[in-house]
Each structure stands twice: as structure tokens, then as C-alpha cells.
Image (spheres, helix red, strand yellow):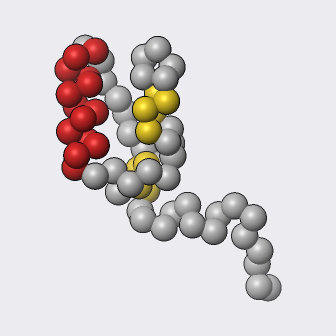
Amino acid sequence: MILGQDIHSATGILLLNEGKELTQHLIDKLRKLEEVEGGSYTLMVCKPGCHEGSEGAESDD
């Protein structure tokens, strides 16, 4: 899974940036952080390749 938007902590610190591949290790770390902070994160994900070529892409039409 690819992260579809940035994830920030409750204090505004960038934790993970858009386009980052979400591995099981990162998901586990976020879950532990949720437990420590007593909050929760909502993640928007997209399929691999969803961000490739989206910026500045030119059409061949």
C-alpha cells in the first residue's frame, strides 16, 4: 500500500509523507504510537504506482 496523504502527529510533526510505501513494520509503529498517545490515525492509501507520472505528465494525444 502507498500512503495517499501525509500523516502528522497530534502536535503537527510530519510522521510519514505522501507516496511512502506502508510496510507492516511502519503500520506496527503507528499502532504503537496510537497506544502511547491515546489517539488514532486515519490513513488514506492508494494502489502502487498511483503517484507515478502524475506531476508534470504530458499527454500523447
Residue 8 location (% of width, % of height): 46, 27
Count the numbered circles shown. 0
Residue 39 location (% of width, % of height): 30, 18
Q: Is residue 58 left or right of residue 8?
A: right
Instruction: Work out whether 4 lies above or below 16.
Output: below
Asked whether 44 or 31 is in front, the reply is 31
Residue 28 location (% of width, % of height): 20, 39
Residue 56 location (% of width, % of height): 75, 64
Question: Image point 49% across, 30% down: which residue?
Answer: 14
Instruction: Work out whether 50 lies above or below 16.
Output: below
Question: Image point 20% across, 20% down: which residue?
Answer: 35
Q: Is residue 52 left or right of residue 1?
A: right
Task: Choose top left, top right, bottom left or bottom right for residue 15.
Answer: top left
Task: Choose top left, top right, bottom left or bottom right for residue 36.
Answer: top left
Instruction: Work out whether 28 lies above or below 23.
Output: above
Asked whether 26 or 5 is in front, the reply is 26
Question: Image point 44% across, 51% down: which residue?
Answer: 20
Q: Is residue 2 left or right of residue 50?
A: left
Asked whether 51 or 17 is in front, the reply is 17
Question: Image point 35% across, 29% down: which residue?
Answer: 41
**For the C terminus, which image quadrant?**
bottom right
